[in-house]
Image (cartoon, helix red, strand yellow):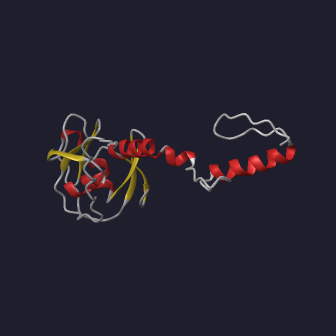
């Protein structure tokens, strides 16, 4: 009484403030899945979408993304920390830089790859002549083409075509 009912979704649209409040409370309870004023239980909208959600979840679970970066690089070889002062010259290369080292251990410690036994020829340190140095340990700092490194002694620095710039390690 005092209201006009318009049936749309199964609910009457009230026309008075009191009727509207009662109607709104009834709608809210139905939306939460609670019994409406007429004793009927209605499922929330999310439950009615259950099959769709299940299918989407199954599709997403079946999709797997695999990223392949290709073959993994080999880990760097550990560099020897201590080398003997034995003189067995080798010619070694790192990039475009060729250099004569007193022994293979010293070359590998500096990151060079051994090319051959004996000193480098054609200006790759040592000037093509074989230089014999003592095993005396009197470190020197030497420079060549802007590159600075420590040698066990001045003889080995000169044999590698470096210029001694100071006594002691660099």
Q: Position of residue 3 (x, y in %)?
A: 82, 39
Task: Please identify the residue farthest to the left as the structure is shown.
Answer: 117
Q: Position of residue 75 (x, y in %)?
A: 27, 53
Q: Is residue 53 above or below residue 156?
A: above
Q: Which quadrant holds residue 155?
A: bottom left
Identity of the residue drawn at 32% across and 60% down: 152
Say which of 22 and 103 sits in front: 22
Identity of the residue drawn at 27% across and 59% down: 78
Q: Which quadrant holds residue 133?
A: bottom left
Q: Position of residue 45 (x, y in %)?
A: 56, 45
- Across the whole image, how many numbered discs are drawn on residues? 0
Q: Quadrant of the N terminus?
A: top right
Can I make out residue 103 in this image? no
Q: Quadrant of the C terminus?
A: bottom left
Q: Which quadrant holds residue 139?
A: bottom left
User: On the picture, is 69 further left or further right than 20?
Assistant: left
Identity of the residue drawn at 57% across and 50% down: 42
Identity of the residue drawn at 32% across and 58% down: 153
User: On the picture, is 137 further left or further right than 120?
Assistant: right
Say which of 44 and 20 sits in front: 20
Q: Is residue 16 above or below residue 81?
A: above
Can I make out residue 22 in this image? yes
Task: Please identify the residue farthest to the front as the structure is shown.
Answer: 1
User: On the picture, is 37 further left or further right than 78?
Assistant: right
Q: Position of residue 83 (x, y in %)?
A: 25, 63
Say which of 161 and 103 sits in front: 103
């Amino acid at each position: 009484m005092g209201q006009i009912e318009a049936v749309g979704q199964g609910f009457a649209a009230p026309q008075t403030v009191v009727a509207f409040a009662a109607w709104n409370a009834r709608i809210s309870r139905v939306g939460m899945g609670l019994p409406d004023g007429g004793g009927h239980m209605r499922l929330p909208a999310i439950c009615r979408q259950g099959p769709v959600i299940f299918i989407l979840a199954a599709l997403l679970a079946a999709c797997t993304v695999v990223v392949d970066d290709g073959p993994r690089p080999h880990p760097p070889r550990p560099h020897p920390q201590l080398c003997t002062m034995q003189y067995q010259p080798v010619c070694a290369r790192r990039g475009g830089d060729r250099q004569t080292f007193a022994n293979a251990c010293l070359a590998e410690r500096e990151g060079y790859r051994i090319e051959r036994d004996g000193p480098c020829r054609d200006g790759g340190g040592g000037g093509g002549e074989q230089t014999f140095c003592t095993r005396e340990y009197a470190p020197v700092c030497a420079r060549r083409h802007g590159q600075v490194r420590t040698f066990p002694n001045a003889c080995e620095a000169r044999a590698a075509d470096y210029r001694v710039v100071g006594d002691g390690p660099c």
